[in-house]
Structures are given as C-alpha cells and as structure tokens.
Image: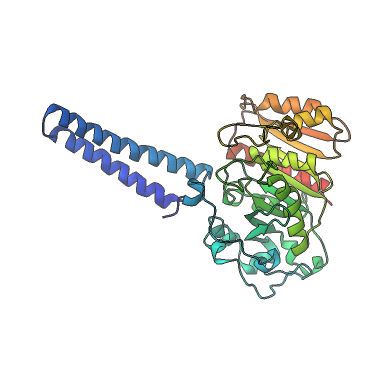
Amino acid sequence: MPLLGWPLVLTLSVVTLVTMVVTLVAWPRVRGGRPLRVAQRVGLLLVTQVATVLLVAAGMNNYGYFFGSWSDLVGQTSSGAPDPATISRALGVKPDSSGTDHGRTGVAPSQTQSAVAHATQWSTSAQWSTKGRVQAVTIAGAHSGMSEEALVYLPPQYFQPAYRHTRFPGVEVLTGYPGMTTALVERMHYPSILLSEMAHHRAKPMVLVMMRPTIAPPRDTECTDVPAGPLALTYFAEDVPRAVASDLRVNATGWGAMGDSTGGYCATKLAMTHSSVFTSAVSLSGYYHTLRDGTTGDLWGGSPQVRHLNDLEWLLQHQPAPPVSVYASIGTNELGHNGIVDTRRFASLVRPPMSVQVVTVAGGGHNFRDWSRVVPAGLDFLARRLT
C-alpha cells in the first residue's frame, strides 16, 4: 500500500477504531493477578496509542507531502543505477522538434513506479498543444555524479508549430525539506497557475523543472556542496540547467529559481552564487542564513569559510552583490528564527546591482495555503525577468 494517499489513512482509521473498541470491551474482562491485569491493560492502551499516532502521522503526511514512499521514510534511495536515457527520450520530444511526438520510449520502469509518476496524468497527449505536458524524468548530473527525479512542465507553446524554433526560459521549482515533488503539481498547482497567468497575459511560456532539494535522503543538504560530497549545489546550479538545455528547447542561461521554505533558501542561493546561469529567484517563506540541525549535520566539514560561503546574509555583507533579482514573500505570523525578522534583515543588506522585492502575507504562515496565494505573483515576477 502506498505511503501517500487516502487508502493508508482509511486503513489506519479502521485499525484505530477497532483497537479502541477492543480496548473498551476487553478492559473489564482481563483476568489474572493484579500485576497481570495491569500488564494487559497497559498493553491495550499501548496498542491503541500506537494506532492513533500512526493515523495522525499518515494524515499529516498526506496533507504536507513530506514523504512520498516507504523508501523515502526510511531514508533509502531507489535501487538500481539511473536510467541513461536522455530527458528528451523520456519526454518523447526532440530538442529541435515542432512539438510532435517522435516515438515515445517512455521513462524507465523504476520511474513509472515512483511517487511522481501519477502526476504525469495532468494532461493527455491530445491536450499538450493547449494545456501543456507534465512528465516524470530522471536528471543525471555529469559533474556532481548525482541524479534525481523531476517533473518537467512543458507549456502548450512548446508543442505548437509556431514555436518550433523557440528556446524557452527555464525555471527550477523546489519543494521544502524533505519535500514531495508531486506536491508542486497537486498541492501548489504550478502548471495550472502558470497556464492561467499566460492566458491572462501576465506571464509568458516557461519550462518548469520541478524537484525536491532532498537528493541525499534522509539528509538535508541545504543545496550545499558538502566537503567530500554530496555536491548538491553543483547538481542544482550546473548539472540540471545543462542537462535540460541539452535535451530540450530551453535556454542554457537566464534561468529562474523558485521554492518554498528550504526550497526558497535554495532558490535564492542558486541566483546569488551562480548569477551567470540564474538571473532571478522567488523565495516563499525561505530563510537566508546557514542552518544546522539534526537533519543537516555538519555541511561544511568544520570549515568556517565554507559555512560563510553558504550564508546568504554573510555574502551580502562581505562580497560584491550579484546582478540578480529576488522576490521574497513571508507571512506575518512567521515569527521564528527563520521568519519575518530574518527576511527583513536579508532585504536590508541587499544593494545594487542586486534588487529585492519583499511581500508580506497578512496573517500568513508556513503552509501550502499561504504559499499558493503568492505563486501567481512569483511566476509573473520571473516571467518579466527571464528572456
């Protein structure tokens, strides 16, 4: 049974209800001496509590898209080597094609069974020229040696003859940690929102490469080139744009980045540290300093210099500002260390040629609902700056 979805929640609901009923019925009927009766009743309570905790955890995961599979939950990567097929083969679209289907080979079996595969049902092949296409692919990094699944959204113009020679702007869209790529389609609705913004002439066609930043689960790498590996920053900043641009009609430079929470930190980091590739970023409730906790461990190999170079506020204080634009949104109810105070401090450090636009969401918090309210404006921000 899949970890994500209502079948597991409903099954655990039934199990929890049954354990409660059994506890109520069996409680007055336990037999034996006092120690044995106490042990039996404690056992009944423990079974009921475990079932309840599992139900709550499954419900929260179903809402938050934290873990998409059992292997994600236990911190295992998918078995087998990455499929060597190029992105264009997986999509069934040649880089120089007019958008027609050139003999689809499909994604590798390991990808079709993945947690992101069902998001590809967002449109049918008959709708590609009017709605666009979402497809699961595996992007292998030539320089980092890493690979990760992604959901690529190709806008309808990609499949229209009038755009057969057009190369489109690329945008990396990142979840928070640990994240679930499917949430970007099914909960955040990035393809649907971009389609709507284009229909209202507020945005232009862009190719969205939707991913999660958790490429070395269960560790949170914070999109950092960790000494002795993994090279997460190299993967997202260099490998992904190059791989996509080589196999699809997408510009190799002039990219945008967008993400929520940890994804927001990563998006801003990509733009600030690789401005030759990324010109702009959108951060939804992101933070702007280095983070160390139980999920990250020491990402800097004990080196203060490496830590500083991954601290966006330190970079603004000690290095020339890069020529990039940042759109930073934050909820007024986000009062923690990574909340509204941090966002305002970051904005106060920005100086030309870098620019920042801060948007506060009244009553907003750290959740999908409030991030979704800002996604349209964030995509419009990127569309105005990408060529």
Q: How is the image coloured?
A: rainbow
Asked whether residue 260 is in view, the answer is no
The location of residue 167, given as percent across then percent down, is 81, 61
Asked whether residue 302 is in view, the answer is yes
Residue in view at x 40 percent, y 47 percent: 9
The location of residue 339, given as percent across then percent down, is 65, 27
The location of residue 291, given as percent across then percent down, is 65, 32
The location of residue 123, given as percent across then percent down, is 61, 62
Instruction: Classify residue 156 by image quadrant.
Output: bottom right
Instruction: Classify residue 260 by image quadrant.
Output: top right
Q: Is residue 219 left or right of residue 19?
A: right
Q: Is residue 354 left or right of residue 335?
A: right
The number of numbered discs placed on residues in the rendered structure image is: 0
Residue in view at x 75 percent, y 54 percent: 241
Q: Nearer the viewer, residue 340 or 299?
A: 299
Q: Is residue 43 left or right of residue 246?
A: left
Relative to residue 57, is residue 189 depicted above or below?
below
Q: Nearer the viewer, residue 63 or 376?
A: 63
Q: Quadrant of the N terminus?
A: bottom left
Q: Nearer the viewer, residue 59 or 197?
A: 59
Direction left: furthest residue: 32
Direction right: furthest residue: 353
Residue in view at x 70 percent, y 26 percent: 342
Residue in view at x 71 percent, y 28 percent: 343
Q: Is residue 37 left or right of residue 67?
A: left
